[in-house]
Amino acid sequence: MADLRIAIVASRFNPEITERLVAGAQEALRGEAAVTLIHVPGAFEIPLTAKQAALSGRFDAIVALGCVIRGETAHFEFISQVASHGIAQVGLETGIPVTFGVLTAETDEQAMARSVPGPDNKGYHAAQAAVEMVRVLRGLR
C-alpha cells in the first residue's frame, strides 16, 4: 500500500521519548507510505493539528504521538483527557483514521520502556494501526 499518505503529528514535549516514538512510526511506515512529520508544542495541541491535517485532504491517516508523564499536580489528568478525547473526536468527525500513540505514563522509566527501538515501540504500533485502518475503511467503501 505504498500509495498511502500519512501525517505524523508529534509533540515536542518530552523529546527524549517522542523522538523515539517518531522513529518507531517512521520505521513501521517505511515502504508503506509517504510520510509528513508535523511537530507541535505538546499533547494538548495534537487534536487541533490532527484535525487540520485530516481536513486538508492530503492524508489518508494521521498518527498522533506524544508523551505525558504524571507529575505532582492534576495537570497530567487534564492533558491526558484532552488529548485522548480530542484525537478520537478528529477521526469521528472527519472519517480519517487517527491513531493514538500518546503515552500516558506514571514514570520516565515506563515511557522509555514503551518507546524502545523496534516493534515494541508504541509509535511503531500506532503507525501499523493507521495502515490497517486505511485498509479497513477502503474495504467498507
Image (cartoon, rainbow, N blue to C red):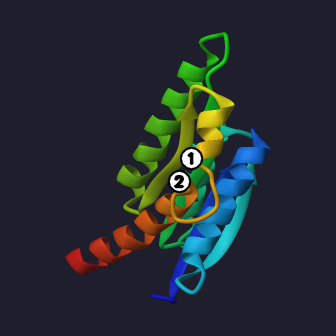
Identify the image quadrant of the C terminus: bottom left
What residue does disc 2 label?
A: 122
Q: Amino acid at mark 1?
A: Arg
Give the residue at x 65% y 10%: 73
Going by the image, does 16 lie left or right of 130? Answer: right
Question: What's the mark number on residue 38?
Answer: none
Task: Check contact, mark 1 vs mark 2: CB within 8 A.
Answer: yes
In the figure, 36 relative to 83: above or below?
below
| Secondary structure state at the residue bearing disc 1 | loop
Return the disc, 1 or 2, that comes first in the chain's sequence: 1
Give the crowd class for mark 2: few <14, some 14-19, many >=20 residues within 10 Å.
many
Gap in Å between the C-alphas at discs 1 and 2? Answer: 6 Å
Tag 2: amino acid:
Lys
Q: Position of residue 11 (x, y in %)?
A: 70, 46
Q: Nearer the viewer, mark 1 or mark 2?
A: 1
Can you give x and y, in whole percent of width and height, for residue 99 in the image?
Answer: 46, 56
Specify the label residue 114 is tagged with: 1
Residue 101 coordinates in the image, percent (x, y): 53, 50
